[in-house]
Image (spheres, grey):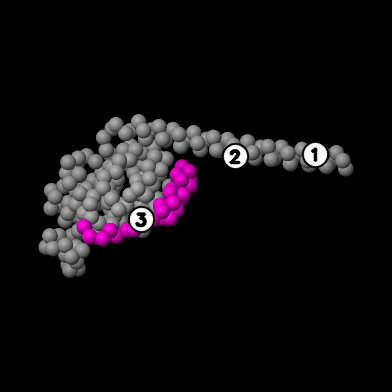
Amino acid sequence: MRVKLLRRYWLRQWQRLITRFGLFGLGVLLCGGLLINGLKAYSAASGSVDAFFVLGGSITREVYVANLAKQQPSARVLISSGSQDPCIIKIFQQQWAPINRVWLEKCADSTFSNFYFNIPILKKWGVRKVKLITSPSHLPRAKWMAQILLGAQGIWVEVDTVKEEGVPGNKESSLKTGLDLTRSLIWAVLSQFIQPQCTELTPLKSVDMEEWRNSGFNCENQWWLKLD
């Protein structure tokens, strides 16, 4: 009986030891992976921008990125939950900007989900350096989230801000910033294993303008963006 008890005791001790070493090893691998990705991002800092990433919320951001796309036509453009499709295509047409490398993502409904759904897209494209387009009222929260989440995937981020007219659509607070940064740090780890897929990703060049015209749609009451 005593021998059996000793066997059980030592078996439990070995199981605990193996579990602890397993968790320690997993932690080392995760930290190592994040460090390597951070170094990859840093090494891309001096390179050219591969993609422009627009956080939706204002048509002025889309006008701004259209001008950037005209200056750098080789870069991809990813607009997350922006204006309606025909309005964006009209902006690019009026700015004489190319539309064949522009994609519209419609899954996100918050700043966090802007990154949650779009970072896998940027990774799939092989992006090493991205320019984030947002508004001054969205800082510093959006910038810090981008640095955490994009950096964890080995992507360097620069931020361009576009001044808005009128009252900003979003209101920043210490609580909102703290909550978003906390879940960004958690997701930076989980995203090493989980890659969400957005099913609502549309190439701008595939937008059917005729269908939108027939529906009588207008662009956010912007007279200079008439669809006819």
Image quarter (top left, top right, bottom left or bottom right) of the C terminus: bottom left
Residue 103 part of the magenta-drawn span: no
Foreground pick, 96 / 101: 96
Image quadrant of residue 220? bottom left
Q: Residue at x 21, y 57 (%)?
A: 165
Amino acid on which the number 3 mark rests in the picture: Glu
Label 2 amino acid? Leu
Q: Is residue 91 above or below residue 9?
A: below
Is 187 magenta? The answer is yes
Residue 172: give its label. 3
Residue at mark 2 to residue at mark 1: CA–CA distance: 24 Å
Residue 165 shows in this picture: yes
Magenta range: 165-192
Q: Around disc 3, counting alpha carbons within 10 Å, would you say few (fewer than 14), some (14 to 19), or many (20 or more)?
A: few
Q: Secondary structure at mark 1?
A: helix
In the rendered view, does 117 fall on the left or right side of 221? right
- Give the CA distance from mark 1 to mark 3: 59 Å
Q: Earlier in the sequence, mark 3 or mark 2?
A: 2
Place of residue 223 in the rendered image (x, y in percent of width and height, measured from the top left): 13, 63
In the displayed structure, does residue 217 sit left or right of residue 29? left
For the residue marked with disc 1, what is the amino acid?
Arg
Q: Which residue is mark 2?
A: 23
Name which of mark 2 and mark 1 comes first in the sequence.
1
Please name the predominant secondary structure of the magenta segment in the image: helix
Of 201 and 135, nearer the camera is: 135
Of marks 2 and 1, the one in the foreground:
2
Q: Residue furthest front?
A: 174
Circle 1 is placed at which residue position?
7
